[in-house]
Every structure is written in structure tokens, then in C-alpha cells.
Amino acid sequence: MAIYQIADMIRMRRKALNWTQEELIQIYNAGDESEDISGNQVRDKKGNQDSDQSNEICSVQVLHRIENGEVQRVKLDVYRDIMKKFGLLPERMYASLMVTDTKALNLKININTYFYTDNYEQAEKELQELETMMISGYARNKQYLMGRRATLAYMQRKISPEEYLKILWDALRLTIPMIDKIDIAEWPFNEEEFNILSGIGNAYSSMDEREKELEFLLKLKKNAEKEYMDTDHYIVWHMRALQGLSQLMCRERQHKKSMEYCETGLRECKDQRILGESYDFLYDIVWNKEQQIREGIFDHVESPEEREALIKEERAFCKDILAQAYYLSLAQGSVHKSERIKKLYEEFYPEEAKLL
């Protein structure tokens, strides 16, 4: 789970609901509490506790200080009450699954690995074991199971993209009841919620809902770039949004825009010294460059010899980075992706030596 700041949690949710600070104060002050948002008792100008101000729990000034990070600690009960004003369930405040056995953490890690390596049969087996360790009636547990099972069924083509999309939105409503009313570019999500959002982007792609997909992915990208999560989660979430946008731009034949997203993703992989799913970006770069060659990117060059030399140089570059993508995918254990890359290599360069 990503590490968040109280300032982010309050500021981003308020903005996602299009509330001003004044409106949040008014909503919060409608309660019965007799403390302000930072846990201080309300006192009058003389320093005495003012019972007449019992409904004036919080001021805009205090809220402004909290959202700017000037107040580092907020009473837990007060924080929970603020979250309830945002419409969140009390259990939404907790970060992880509620289980009866510490072995559950290892199972969850294993399941992620099996999804990543397309080993769906083993993922289902360990998911069933994990469910036996989950405490029933906990919304986050139900959400996790709904999301994972729906993704397994979708990846194995047991349900349609439309069915997958509906299940994922229903899963989000378990922890964010007002999900249909908020701007997802502004709302702070946790890890499992972002996993579900990534699945929603994939569903739009499969349904060929390109306008909805573009709007949705741009919001996910904007959300991740707020960097309200720790660095590890930021990189993963940002790369997912960039990958989705790159592939959408491929389908739209906006080659330059697709490669811009790829180059941003590769630069972040390099800066953070991680492999990530860099092979997807390399794959898209090659696909785009080959389309540009076939669409006549070098037609402006008058000399046939010079044009051929440029094409030869470009394709040498493409073959090199596609081979890199292939071996990186093998190193990451992604059989599906390595086969996909190999197929593209053999399609574009049938006369070349085989990758393996």
C-alpha cells in the first residue's frame, strides 16, 4: 500500500467533490463534535471554551494549514469523521486486507506474480486459498476478490469486456460509494483501487470505446502525476497510464504522440533503475517507427539511395531495440509478452535470424 499524507487525503478528496474549503467546513460543522479538525477544543477570543460555538468545529484557516501540510497530526476520530463527510465507509481508512493468517501476505504477492506471468491457473488456486484466510463482511476483502476473479475470467475470455467493466465499477463502489460523482483525476486511490481502474481502461480498449478510453487514461495519468503516493507506487501507476495511452495512440495512428508516451515511460524506468514493463514501450516504439516508414516518412528525401540508407538505419535500430524488448520480457518471466514481441519481430523482419 502506498504511503499518503493527511494533507493529500483531505485536499484531493475535497477537490474531487468540487467542494470549497468553506463548504467542507460547513458540512463538517453540522456534526455534534466539540473539537476542531486538528483536535483542539473551540475557545472564544478570551481563551475560554465557548459552548455557543460548539457547531463551529473547524475554521477555514485551520483547514488551510492542514491542506498545506502545516498540521502534521490530526486526531484519528476527527480524521475518520472528515472521511465520513466525504462519503467513505469507516473501513476505507485501512490499507490492507483483513485476514486471519500472516501467510496471506505471501499468497497475495504470489498471486500478483502469477498474474504478471500469465499463470492464471496457479493464480486461481492461490486465490482460493487466500479467501479461506479472509475475514468475511469486510468491503476491501470483497473488493479484492471481485477484482481479481473478474480479471482472471476476462483474461481467459470467460466474460465479455462489458461484463468485466460492470464488475469493476461495482467493486470500486464497495470502498468509494460516490465513485460516479467524483473526478478520478483528483481522488487519491489505494493500490487495489488503482489496479481496478487499470482494468477499466483495458475494458474500454477491448470495447473499442476510444473516446471514453482516452478521457479515462488521461485522468489516470493526471492522477498518478500528483505523486500523492510513494515513489514505487507512483512509477508503477504512471507507467500503466502511459502504456495505455501509447497503445491507444498506436490504434489511432498518432505515431509521434505514442512514442512520446513511450519515451517518458522509458526515461522513468532509467531514472528509477528498474526494468518495469519497459519492453512494452520498446515494442510500441518499433511498431510506430515501422508504420511511419511504410507511410512514407522518408519520401521527402529526393535521392533513392539516401532514402534507402535512412530506412536501413532506422530498421537496424528497430531490430536492436525489439531484440532488447524480447530478452527483457524473458528476464521478467512474461511468456505472453515475449511471444508477442517475437511474433512482431518475425513479421517485420522475416529474413533476419530468429530471436531464439
Image (cartoon, grey):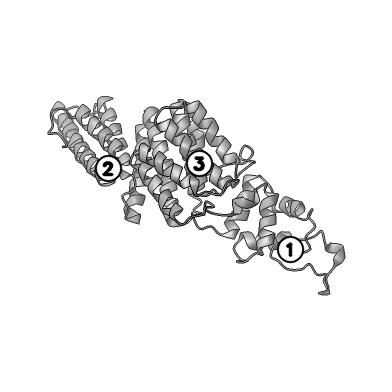
Q: Is residue 64 visible?
A: yes
Which numbered disc, 3 or 2, marks the residue that appears first in the sequence? 3
Distance between the alpha carbons at the discs numbered 2 and 1:
53 Å
Q: Vertically, is 306 above or below 272?
A: above
Q: The disc labelled 3 sits on which kind of residue?
A: Leu
Q: Residues within 10 Å of mark 1 (few under 14, many from 20)?
A: many
**Residue on which disc 3 sits:** 145
**Residue on which disc 2 sits:** 329
Q: Vertically, is 36 above or below 14?
A: below
Q: Judging from the image, what secondary structure is the residue with disc 1 in?
A: loop
| Marks 2, 1: nearer the viewer | 2
Quadrant including the C terminus: top left
Which numbered disc, 3 or 1, marks the residue that appears first in the sequence? 1
* Residue 36 tag number: 1
Q: Judging from the image, what secondary structure is the residue with disc 2 in?
A: helix
Q: Residues within 10 Å of mark 3 (few under 14, many from 20)?
A: some
Q: Is residue 292 left or right of residue 80?
A: left
Q: Residues within 10 Å of mark 2 (few under 14, many from 20)?
A: many
| Residue drawn 58% across the image and 36% down it | 170
Tell me residue 179's x, y (percent).
61, 40
Distance between the alpha carbons at the discs numbered 3 and 1:
38 Å
Distance between the alpha carbons at the discs numbered 3 and 2:
28 Å
Q: The disc labelled 1 sits on which kind of residue?
A: Asp
